[in-house]
Image (spheres, rainbow, N blue to C red):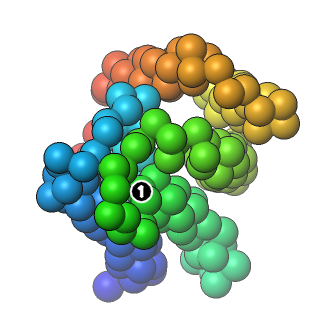
Amino acid sequence: MTAFEYVIVLISIILGLGITQIMMGLADLVHQWNRVKFYWPHLIWIMLVFVLHIQDWWDTYNLRGFEPWRLPTFLFFSLYPVNLFVLARILFPFQPTDGTIDLREFYFQNFRKFFISTMLLNLLSIAENIMVRGVEYSLLVPAGLFLLLGGFVIRPVDSERYHKLLTLLLLALLIFSVVLNWNTWLID
């Protein structure tokens, strides 16, 4: 067993726990379908976080040539999946209620937490890219996203229109990154 194979096991478990949170949260919403008032920006956030879990698992394979693995290095690399897990957990209401589950209301009560967690993901992504790949132009996207989300956190924007626009922008960025990296996200 290589050092990479050893450390990837725990990272995969953490990512799997996050994916489990998302799947269980979705199953709970489906189970209580008649009581749920869905809100499409929140559903897109769920999809984005799910894809980020898969993307991190996929991209972690690129660390197979990274050496040597030391505990502090591993702890640093595990911060991203741990933060993804937390983000997956806070995407869903976890206290069952007897009344209606209003995902719009839930979203607006918790969007700062979503954004702060996503900002932390962006900082970790920048640091990891610098550590593994050196400084690249690709750091501009996470840096820009960090600033954009930071603006929403520092000066809370409660306008539903802005949140819908931001959600569509994030979805477009995800689609753009998949298209842009189509031939680089390969496992050979």
Q: Residue 155: x and y, percent?
A: 83, 31
Farthest-out residue, front? 99
Secondary structure found at label 1: loop
Identify the residue at image location x=43%, y=29%. Answer: 41
Vertical order, 121 against 98 (above or below): above
Using the image as rendered, state which of residue 17 and residue 13 is in the foreground. 17
Q: Is residue 180 among what the camera can see?
A: no
Q: Position of residue 31 (x, y in %)?
A: 15, 58
Image quarter where the N terminus lies is bottom left
Type of amino acid under label 1: Phe
Please give the residue where the numbered disc 1 appears in the rendered image. 92
Q: Position of residue 49 (x, y in %)?
A: 42, 46
Q: Residue at x 46, y 18 (%)?
A: 168
Where residue 130 sits in the image (x, y, percent)?
71, 46
**Marker count (numbered):** 1
Dividing the picture into quarters, in which one does residue 2 lie? bottom left
* 46 in relation to 156, above or below: below
Q: Residue at x 51, y 59 (%)?
A: 90
**9 displayed left or right of 165:** left
Q: Quadrant of residue 73?
A: bottom right
Residue 14 appears anywhere in the view:
yes
